[in-house]
Amino acid sequence: MFRWILLFVLIVPALEIGLLVWAGGQIGPWWVVILIISTGVLGAWLAKQQGLETLAKARSSMDQGQLPQEQIFDGICILIGGVVLLTPGFITDLIGFILLIPTTRVPIKNALKKLAQRWMNQGRVRIFRG
């Protein structure tokens, strides 16, 4: 897992810089700045909307006496998507929007569930009940 994070931290910024320089040459540096600011604002708005919707669903589940499992995974994706959208770049913006849009979030959410289940089966994660 650490290897993937390290690769992400090293490779993605280099690709982002190259893509930003290329885009600046194609459409001009000011348009690139406007795009970066616009995606940040749109992403923050979308993250807020999705976060509030997920929180309402979680409250509804808990009111019915159910564990808000789906909403927990949605919340994780929304948090990561919102944070990634705040970093300048087109690749990270794409990742952020994928994590914020409910229909594109589903496969990532399912992968997170499988990873969490695997970690619990391996004993990496322990759940304590009071």
Image: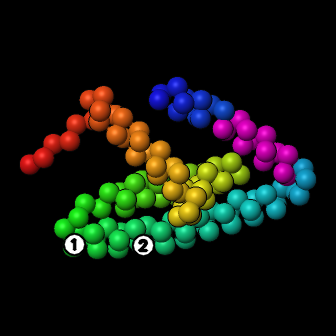
* Residue 23 counted in the magenta span: yes
> Magenta residues?
12-24
Instruction: Judge from the rendering whether residue 36 lies leftward or rightward of residue 86; answer left or right.
Output: right
* Marking on residue 53: 2
Residue 25 percent location from the top left of the image: 90, 50
Tell me the residue that label 1 is attached to.
Answer: 64
In x, y percent, where is residue 61? 27, 69
The main secondary structure of the magenta stretch is helix
Above or below, 80 against 60 in this view is above
The picture places residue 110, in percent across and down from the top left corner, at 46, 49
Q: Is residue 81 visible?
A: no
Q: Quadrant of residue 68?
A: bottom left
Closest to the observer, 59 or 37: 59
Q: What whole-number distance in Å separates the C-alpha atoms at marks 1 and 2?
A: 17 Å
Residue at the spot 40% in from the left edge and 68% down from the top edge: 54
Q: Is residue 16 above or below residue 61?
A: above
- Mark number displayed over residue 103: none
Most distant residue in the top direction? 3
Residue 61: within the magenta?
A: no
Q: Is residue 95 left or right of residue 123?
A: right
Query: Is 11 displayed left or right of 76 in the figure?
Result: right
The correct choice, above or below, for 76 with respect to 123 in the image is below
Residue at the (29%, 36%) spot, across then down = 120
Query: Visible in this render: residue 99?
Result: yes
Question: Marks 1 and 2: CB-CB under 8 Å?
Answer: no
Question: What's under tag 1, amino acid-wise?
Answer: Gln
| Type of the residue with mark 2 | Glu
